[in-house]
């Protein structure tokens, strides 16, 4: 998605400037260079965590810092975007939760995850896809709505029997 590669080594972890301010400055530079334009999403908290080797709370402070500088705005449940509130956003092809759900459904169809076996949990999805917990939950809810999986409270989410799959596949 982004044409540049992050390098966590560019951060001065022992200096006087807080890490969140340093990361916010790096993103501000990307905005000023035009690498990120108005309406583009700012890298997610999970992506910032991974790319800069920072804690989730530090990643949250990065978004807050960008908002306070007037460089970005946040829409609850959707993310943080470059520009002022109300600025048009770049169109998203397929929501990330749908992409995750489609990939898991494909794994189920290929037999990689058998009926009555658990699908990857929220933490695994968050790590593998670089998404927030709410996005992982949306992916699971989408799979459940389509009939691919069922959830057992306090146990996990499991692959449904093939006759429950969309279109009754496998029946």
Image: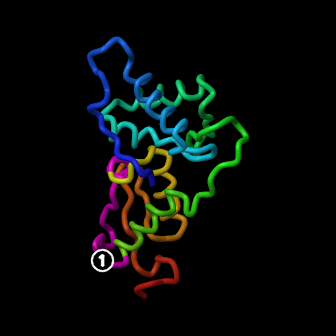
Q: Quadrant of residue 10?
A: top left
Q: Secondary structure at mark 1?
A: loop
Q: Quadrant of the C terminus?
A: bottom left
Circle 1 sits on which residue?
111
Q: Quadrant of the N terminus?
A: bottom left
Q: On the rendered structure, is 91 left or right of 132?
A: right
Q: Nearer the viewer, residue 99 or 80?
A: 80
Relative height, residue 74 to residue 126 (above, below): above
Which residue is depicted at the point 49% across and 83% down? 168
| Location of residue 134 in the rendering, given as x and y in whole percent from the top left corner | 50, 46
Relative height, residue 112 to residue 42 (above, below): below
Q: Nearer the viewer, residue 46 or 98?
A: 46
The magenta span reads: 109-127
Secondary structure, magenta segment, majority class:
loop
| Location of residue 44 in the rendering, given as x and y in whole percent from the top left corner | 46, 42
| Location of residue 17 in the rendering, given as x and y in whole percent from the top left corner | 38, 15
Relative height, residue 110 to residue 20 (above, below): below
Which residue is depicted at the point 26% across and 16% down? 14
Residue sitting at the far top:
16
Q: Residues within 10 Å of mark 1 (few under 14, many from 20)?
A: few
Which residue is depicted at the point 35% across and 30% down? 55
Residue sitting at the far front:
33
Whether residue 122 is in magenta: the answer is: yes
């Amino acid at each position: 998605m982004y044409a540049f590669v992050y390098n966590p080594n560019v951060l001065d972890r022992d200096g006087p400037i807080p890490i969140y301010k340093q990361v916010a400055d790096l993103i501000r530079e990307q905005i000023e260079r035009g690498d990120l334009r108005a309406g583009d999403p700012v890298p997610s908290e999970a992506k910032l965590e991974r790319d800069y080797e920072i804690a989730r709370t530090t990643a949250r402070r990065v978004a807050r810092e960008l908002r306070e500088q007037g460089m970005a705005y946040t829409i609850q449940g959707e993310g943080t975007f470059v520009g002022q509130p109300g600025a048009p956003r770049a169109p998203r092809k397929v929501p990330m939760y749908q992409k995750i759900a489609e990939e898991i459904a494909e794994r189920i169809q290929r037999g990689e995850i058998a009926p009555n076996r658990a699908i990857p949990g929220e933490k695994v999805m968050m790590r593998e896809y670089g998404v927030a917990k709410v996005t992982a939950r949306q992916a699971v809810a989408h799979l459940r709505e389509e009939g691919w999986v069922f959830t057992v409270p306090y146990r996990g989410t499991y692959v449904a029997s093939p006759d429950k799959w969309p279109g009754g596949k496998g029946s």
